[in-house]
Amino acid sequence: EPEVTQTPSHQVTQMGQEVILRCVPISNHLYFYWYRQILGQKVEFLVSFYNNEISEKSEIFDDQFSVERPDGSNFTLKIRSTKLEDSAMYFCASSERGGVGGYTFGSGTRLTVV
Amino acid sequence: QKEVEQDPGPLSVPEGAIVSLNCTYSNSAFQYFMWYRQYSRKGPELLMYTYSSGNKEDGRFTAQVDKSSKYISLFIRDSQPSDSATYLCAMRNGNSGYALNFGKGTSLLVT
């Protein structure tokens, strides 16, 4: 069964550093998303991406965050100047159409900011 | 009022029991409803996807949506120890955007 692949599975970074989280969505999917889950809290939407541009973003997704599809297969989330409160699981997801039929999530990257 | 409310549990049931998991929501614009299963430190795995009121069955799972009451349920028949996980309801607006709104999840333990 096709899956969304995320790397790395765990990243530790120093406060103030920049991190890039990487995702390979399912190949025939056109819509891509990033979500995060702070330990013990609900999964929260960050951003959706379609046709090489952001289609929707949440209040969480401020200037500290950016997304990019650098080539035909990868989808990245960059977090600049990381803060302790950025520590969370970050999930990439993709969907064939705009969420019709559901979204497939990756296994996540656990980001720890120290 | 939170948009999506879900009792976090934990819910503990014996093997073979019927499990009922529920969510309520406040936004009448939500039109698409999903249930995800999440194992510890893993990504959510889609179990059920519905977009209309009524029941949808898939194997041991039945999803139920009541839009008039803003209430959705997931039933698991003949529960197995492998069903032990956190179950997340998720829903999204039918008119604009693709962002999912998640419940906090219900932790289920089947023993």
Image (cartoon, coloured by chain):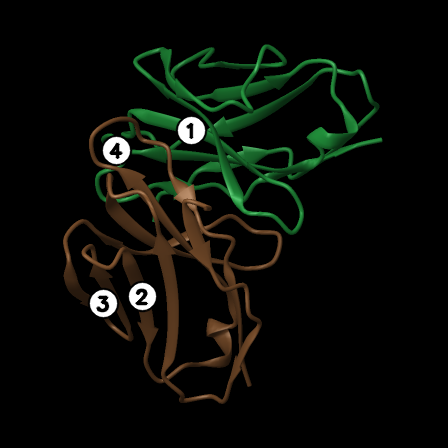
Chain colours: A green, B brown
| Dot 1 and dot 3 within a common chain | no
State the residue in front, B89 or A110: B89
Tell me, for residue A96, which label it has, or none.
Answer: 4
Label 1, residues with CA under 10 Å away: few <14, some 14-19, many ≥20: many
| Of pointers 3 and 2, the one earlier in the residue sequence | 3
Q: Is residue B66 left or right of residue A43?
A: left
CA distance for labels 2 and 1: 26 Å
Q: Chain of mark 1?
A: A
Viewer-nearest of labels 4 and 1?
1
Q: Which residue is mark 2?
A: B73
- Residue at the image point whose x is 14% and y is 63% from the top: B54
Instruction: Tell me where residue A71 sits by quadrant.
Output: top left
CA distance for labels 4 and 2: 25 Å
| Of pointers 4 and 1, the one earlier in the residue sequence | 1
- Residue at the limit of the structure toward the front, as seen here: B1
Percent x, y for residue B40? 60, 58
| Dot 3 and dot 2 within a common chain | yes
